[in-house]
Structure formats: C-alpha cells, structure tokens
Image (cartoon, rainbow, N blue to C red):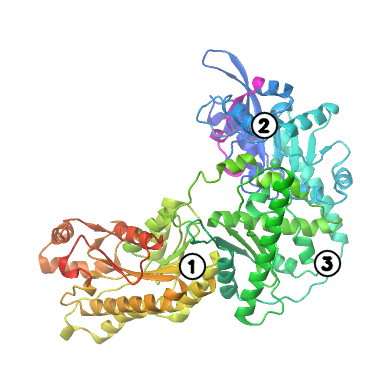
Amino acid sequence: MQNRYNSSQAQALISAVPEQPAALALRVYTSRLIGAEPGLVLHGGGNTSAKARVTTLLGEEMEVLFIKGSGWDLATIEPAGFPALDLGYLRKLRRLEALTDEEMVNQFRTHLRSAAAPDPSIETLVHAFLPHAFIDHTHADAIVTLTNLVDGEALLREALGPEIGILPFIMPGFPLAKEVARLYESRVSMDCIILMHHGIFTFADDAESAYAKMIDYVTRAENFIAEAVGKKPRPAARSAAKPDPAVLLPMLRGALALPDPTGQPRTMLLAVRHDADILAALEREDAEPLFTTGVLTPDHVIRTKNYPLFLDLQGTQGHEDIQARIGLRLTAYRERYDRYVTAQATAQRVTPTRLDPMPRVILVPGLGLVTAGATAKDAGIAADIASHTLRAKIQGAALGPYRELDEASIFAMEYWRLEQAKLGRTRPQSLSGKVALVTGGGGAMALGIGRQLLAAGARLFLSDIDPVRLGRVTGRLAGEFGPGRVDGLVMDVTDLDSVTGGLNRLVLTCGGLDILVPNAGVAHVARLEDLDAAAFVRVMAVNCTGTFTMIKAAVPIFRRQGTGGHIIINSSKNVFAPSPAFGAYSASKAAAHQLGKIAALELAEIGVRVNMINADAVFGDEAVDSGLWAVVGPDRMRARHLDPAGLKDYYRQRNLLKTEVLADHVGHAVVFFASNQTPTTGATLPVDGGIPEAFPR
Ligand SMILES: [Zn+2]
C-alpha cells in the first residue's frame, strides 16, 4: 500500500485557512488520504482524531479533541466533519466505573465546542484516553483478514512484529476506551493496537507519522498474506448453473420484499457484481462453507447482516423450479435469523424492535454477488463490502480456518440501543425502494415527471432514442438529486427487441421495475386529407406501438417479482376532446389509452394498476425543449397570431382554473398513482386546469 503523504500538499492546506489550527488542517489531509484507499476503509468506516489547543471567547487556552463526526466519510471529510470537544473534561470521564452508551453520547453533546456540530464518533473516548496528538483507526482488509483467523493473534505478531498491542473483541464504547488506554500504558513504546474482529489503531504526535504507521503496518500484513497466498494452490472449481439475470433478479427481488405495516410489499433495490474474480470465487469447491461465515468487522452487520445467503441453482429446471429454490432458501435463512434474534434477546434480556430477517448479500454461483438495500446507495455499499469480504476470506483461507465473531457480540452490535432508538424516527419516503422508468426521457415532460419521482424517493431510469437529449435531462436531474439515483437508457420504443434490451440493462442495474410511465410521444400537424401516410405510421408507431411494446416487455418483470406495480400512461386531453389537423396524434393517443384500459383488465390479477393522465398544453422548463412543442408550437402560434408568451397565456385563459399546466404537475399525478394512495385502476386523471369538453366520460 502506497504512502501518499506529500509535504507541500499538506502545507498548502495549512496555509489555505490560516485562522484554523494547523492540526485540524493536517487531520483533514491525512484522513482524506486514508479515505482514498478502499483497502483501508469503506463508506464511512474508520475514524481519526487530532488534539490541539484553542483560545476560547474569553481568551482562555483550552485543549480540544477533533474527532470524526458521524455521517462523514473520510474520503471527502471537511473541517466541519470534525466536531471539537473539551478534551480535559473527556479525560476525567476515565475515573468512572461505568458509563452507558446513552449517557456517553449525552456527555459528548454537552461538551462540544459548537452546538451545531455532528455527533462525535462512538469511538471518541478511545481517542481521548490515548495521549497522542494524532490517532488513525481503520478496518483495513489485510488486518481484519488476520484478526478473523483461528490463529489470528500469533499470525498478527508474526506479520507485524512483537511491538504491537492486541486486544480481544470488545464492543465500542466506554469499556473499550478504558482497555485500549490500559494496554497502551502497560508498554508506552507501542505505536499500534489491533482489536481482534474489528480493526487497527495507529498513533503518533504528528499527522504524517500516525498515517505512515498505518500504511506501514497494513503493508506488512498485505505482504505476509500475499506470500501465503502465493504458496497455496488454488482449490478446484466446480461447474455452476448459468442463471439468466433478467429472470432471476426480479424473482429474487420479489421474494426479498416483505409486507410493510399497511400490507404493501416493501421492495428493495438490488446491486449486482459479477467480475471474473467474483465468478471464480463463487465456483470454488469450498465456496459455500468459506463465504457463509460471519462479517469481517461488526461495523458491517447493519449493511450486510452477519451471513450472506448462498443460492446455488445447480439442478434447477425452468423458472418455477428456480422460484421454488429461492423460496426454500429464503425461508431457511429467515428461520435461522429469527432463531438467532430470539436466542440472543433471551440471553441478553432485551426486547428489541426486530429488524427484517432477509439477507442483504446473496451469492449466486454462475451469476455473481447480489446485494439488497433500501436505496441504490445502500445496495451499492453492501456490494462493496461484500466484494472486499469475499477477497479477504479467500486470502485468509491460505493461512488457516476462519473464526467468526460470536453471535452475542454480533447481536449487541446489530441491535445496539443507540441504533434501535433511531428506528421509526425517520419515515421512509413514499416511493423509496421503488424503481421507475419514464420513456420519452429527453423531453421537458420527462424532466417534470422524473423530478417528482426522485423527490418521492424512487430510483429513476429515463429512456430515449436520442442520447444527446437524454443526457441533458439525466444530467440535469443528477445535478438536482445527486449521483447514483438516475440513469439513462438509450432505446427505441417502437422496437420490441430494443425495449427488451433496455429493460434487461435496467434489471441488471437494480433488480426490477415497479413504475412504468409510457411517455414517449410525437406529434404531426396536418388535416387528414393532407396527412402524409408515412407520417401517420410514424406517429402511431411511437405513441401507440411504443406504449404496447413497453407494457409487453414490462409484464414479465412484474410477474416474476410478484409485488404488483404501476403502469401510468401519459395520455392526452385529445383522447376526449380531439382537435382538427391533429388526427395522427389524437388517434394514436386514443389507441394507447385503450391499451391502458385493457392492461388494467388483464393485470389486476397480478396487482398491477394501470392509470392514465390526460394533460393539456403542458409547459416545461425553458432549458429543456419539448419535442412536442417544437412541432406543434409554431403552427399553433401562427394559427392564433401569437408569440411564445402569448401562447402560454392563451392556454391559461382557455381552462376553467385559468392556470398554467406544468410538467411537474403531471409528475405529482404520477407520484399520486404510484404511491398507492387510493385503490384505483383503469382511471383517467385530467391535469389540464379544467377543460369541460375533455372531462373523462
Ligand atoms: Zn472501528
């Protein structure tokens, strides 16, 4: 592992904010160096601290501890991510015999230098009780690989040298902080402490040395492991079934969805990793016993649960057989999880709020590693942790058998009182865990619909035939909602193969689909006697056939998931109130509308609701042009002798409410249907400001 410390970069950070303590600038710098190394920390793991003297408002000198705040990631941490605490006071806490976690957190909050600071790390007292100015703590892969082996302690001393200190696993909190300080004081030449089943602390009086020691010890562990791996022959591989992800993932996603308190399936998002290393790992002869062991560090439990599910599909014949195998394996997993919670709750005399018993990591030989999470981000974090865990377990196997942490400690972590207290405090958003696809994704309408779906918590896909227009809208939404929540799919809705290919990519990205919004549409202005036959066919192909292909290709996904779903067709006011010179558009929209009603009849048995939104004269965002208005607008303006502003006003004056209809209004209607607020299917909701001749009938 490379030491990335660069003195001139460090100095530049100190000079950038001269009024801030130099120790804090250096602390931010080496914390980011640690965060940039996935072999050291993953997604918010690890924590670092610095001690410094500051002057209070009253001009008094005070010793403070800057410690990583919860919710911050070392890779991107800022000075604001290091709350400062009264160090002199924290040190005095060591006199106490005991301190509950709740009271410890209260002591932190009441001894912060800023009322607005984030909560200090739960490992704050470890940092406070050690005397060093800089302390670095990680769950480095190479270190936890060794701490989870049967001969872990002996191997660690052999790999890292006799100077290190080693402690058995102790829950983070007050007792751990006292034990770490006691161990250090027993031999003050020590510059590194390893916590079995947990991670590593290095410390020094300057930032560069604490960081260099971290890199040095982890590198020693890496080299030691690499040597052992090099000597060990690869185990035999066995052949695996080759399940089709387009079939398996929706089945798995559906089977993982348990009902929420209202009885609706609480779907999760999936992530899939299937690089050559992962596929080879899962085909090892010893894959199942090796990989179904517990976590590398208990921090991972809330992300991945303690055990992955090993889902071997060898010997299954056909879809029903696969579905049955999934059901059996999940039932066994849930029963084991329930037994574990019951046994530990009894032994530890607690009555916990039970967490859902479903696995978060599913290992499928022949397909890869599949993870589940409430959001795409959660599923991705679980996938990163699971990938690192596979690799660590393979490497550790070259040195000896795995020794997992006892279930009592795992339970204490998974059902920690501080974590349990948070449960129920945050209500999930109405569409969290849901996947939505909006076609016609390059236009202004998709921008408004997409924005509202994202605001309601959905994971969004937009599709369009034109990658440039599509990129503009997805880029805009990613800017508003952050990365990883919206993706573009280039596909042609008039071509079933293209649509199926697009949906397969969507399924491989997040496991399935819950909300389909056929929205792609084109217009052509001509009276029937002048209407070009080819133009008519083209309008029918996009507006009508395009709706048909989307429904046809999506139904197998809905069926495999078995969790219901929504089809919400962006129809038109023209279906009830057609206009002259608009024959191709009105006829194609009326046909698509009718398809929606047929779909409502056919799909109710699998819980899929189909509804239509009839919008009129929707104006979107000026920055994203509407394909429809580009065609229709100029003719309408010419016909009515109006400029663009006049056209908007014309449409506003035409409806009962004298209001402008926006793409976001259509988005709100989509979210209304998609969030199951009423038991409605086959219905039409006008979003047009009120146009009497277009009242649904
Ligand atoms: Zn830790």
Q: CA distance from mark 2 to mark 3?
A: 48 Å
- Boundaries of the magenta span: 72-89
The numbered mark, 2 or 1, whose residue comes first in the sequence reads: 2
Q: CA distance from mark 1 to mark 3?
A: 39 Å
- Name which residue lies at 69% across and 30% down: 125
Percent from the top left, x then y, of residue 516? 42, 69
Say left or right for 606 vs 525: right
Image vertical order of residue 686 relative to residue 19, above or below = below
Image vertical order of residue 257 relative to residue 136, above or below = below
As for residue 79 lying within the magenta part, the answer is: yes
Residue 353 numbered mark, or none: none
Name the residue carrying label 1. Answer: 513
The numbered mark, 2 or 3, whose residue comes first in the sequence reads: 2
- Dot 1, crowdedness within 10 Å: few (<14), some or many (≥20)? many
Front of the two marks 1 and 3: 1
Mark 1 belongs to which amino acid?
Leu
